[in-house]
Image (tube, rainbow, N blue to C red):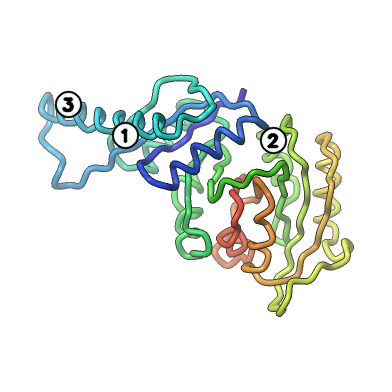
């Protein structure tokens, strides 16, 4: 089972992430743990010693109640592998510390700001994404599908994309596709010949075959990030390497209506 940490907050993003995690568990068996971080304002922090410990215990108790409410509300069909973990401090720092110390293989959190490229880049360039010791699954939507796609482009290292994704999805019974994205301001998105994907596309297909995966569809798409992002809505999961700010692939992922798993 894949040791997984899911971040819980009291919001719609978490609600969808919980339901998506239960669905994902049907394809990848998870040893699921959940966590929440309370980030107090400076004005809320108090003293030292027993006074601070008492204050932290109260804040932690509130966090546990929050988690309990969300779990009872969603009542997902995916048993927890351990007690919920609540921390007090800086969110990204506390999560990374737990991921490293707990030897997790996957981190999951909800994110609903689809099409907000600036907000999405802020997320993928945060310490949580850039310093995480494991892949991060960003849940954007509850897409009920058996299809998973690997997103390729000229800036993607096929070996990193396939090797790291198969560490998570190697035993999953998803239907796998490959999409190679080529940016162009077309009025309508175009499907190009497979040869337009060049050696990087060939290598990705070959590496997937070596991993024992049969690729159902290989598509080269020429268009805008908005067009390709909308095209991805049929997939349960889009897998990509961590994009850069200037990469058009980053804008595709921001506009993706499907959930995104980032590997590096």
Indicate the quadrant where residue 253 lies.
Answer: bottom right
- State which mark lies toward you, 3 or 2: 2
Q: Is residue 247 above or below residue 10?
A: below
* Residue identified by numbered label 3: 53
Disc 1 packing (10 Å; few <14; some 14–19; many ≥20): some
Indicate the quadrant where residue 66 lies.
Answer: top left
Residue at x 85% of width, y 57% of height: 199
Indicate the quadrant where residue 220 lies.
Answer: bottom right
Residue at x 35% of width, y 41% of height: 10
Q: Earlier in the sequence, mark 3 or mark 2?
A: 3
Element class at badge 2 = helix
Q: Is residue 264 visible?
A: no
Residue at x 67% of width, y 39% of height: 164
- State which mark lies toward you, 3 or 1: 1
The answer for how far apart the CA atoms under marks 3 and 2 are is: 42 Å
The answer for how far apart the CA atoms under marks 3 and 1 are is: 20 Å
- State which mark lies toward you, 2 or 1: 1
Q: Earlier in the sequence, mark 3 or mark 1?
A: 3
* Of residues 5 and 135, the one drawn nearer to the viewer in this rendering: 5
* Residue identified by numbered label 2: 169
Residue at x 38% of width, y 35% of height: 70
Disc 2 packing (10 Å; few <14; some 14–19; many ≥20): some
Give the residue furthest to the top: 82
Element class at badge 1 = helix
The answer for how far apart the CA atoms under marks 2 and 1 are is: 31 Å
The x, y position of residue 212, in whole percent, is 83, 34
The x, y position of residue 117, in whole percent, is 51, 65
* Residue identified by numbered label 1: 66
Give the side of residue 225 with respect to residue 76, left or right.
Answer: right
Q: Quadrant of the N terminus?
A: top right
* Of residues 240 and 19, the one drawn nearer to the viewer in this rendering: 19
Q: Is residue 43 visible?
A: yes
């Amino acid at each position: 089972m894949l040791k997984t940490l899911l971040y819980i907050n009291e919001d719609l993003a978490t609600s969808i992430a919980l339901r998506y995690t239960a669905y994902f568990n049907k394809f990848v068996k998870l040893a699921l743990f959940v966590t929440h971080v309370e980030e107090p304002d400076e004005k809320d922090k108090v003293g030292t010693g027993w006074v601070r410990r008492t204050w932290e215990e109260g804040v932690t108790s509130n966090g546990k109640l929050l988690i309990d409410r969300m779990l009872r509300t969603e009542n997902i069909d995916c048993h927890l592998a351990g007690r919920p973990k609540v921390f007090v401090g800086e969110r990204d720092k506390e999560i990374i510390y737990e991921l490293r110390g707990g030897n997790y293989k996957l981190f999951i959190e909800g994110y609903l700001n689809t099409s907000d490229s600036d907000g999405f880049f802020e997320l993928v360039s945060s310490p949580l994404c850039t310093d995480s010791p494991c892949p991060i699954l960003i849940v954007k939507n509850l897409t009920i599908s058996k299809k998973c796609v690997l997103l390729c482009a000229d800036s993607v290292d096929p070996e990193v994309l396939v090797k790291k994704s198969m560490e998570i999805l190697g035993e999953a019974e998803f239907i796998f596709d490959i999409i190679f994205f080529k940016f162009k301001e077309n009025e309508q998105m175009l499907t190009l010949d497979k040869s337009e994907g060049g050696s990087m596309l060939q290598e990705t297909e070959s590496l997937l075959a070596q991993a024992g995966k049969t690729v159902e569809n290989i598509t080269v798409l020429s268009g805008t990030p908005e067009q390709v992002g909308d095209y991805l809505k049929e997939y349960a999961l889009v897998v990509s390497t961590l994009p850069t700010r200037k990469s058009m692939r980053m804008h595709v992922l921001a506009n993706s209506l499907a959930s995104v798993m980032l590997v590096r």
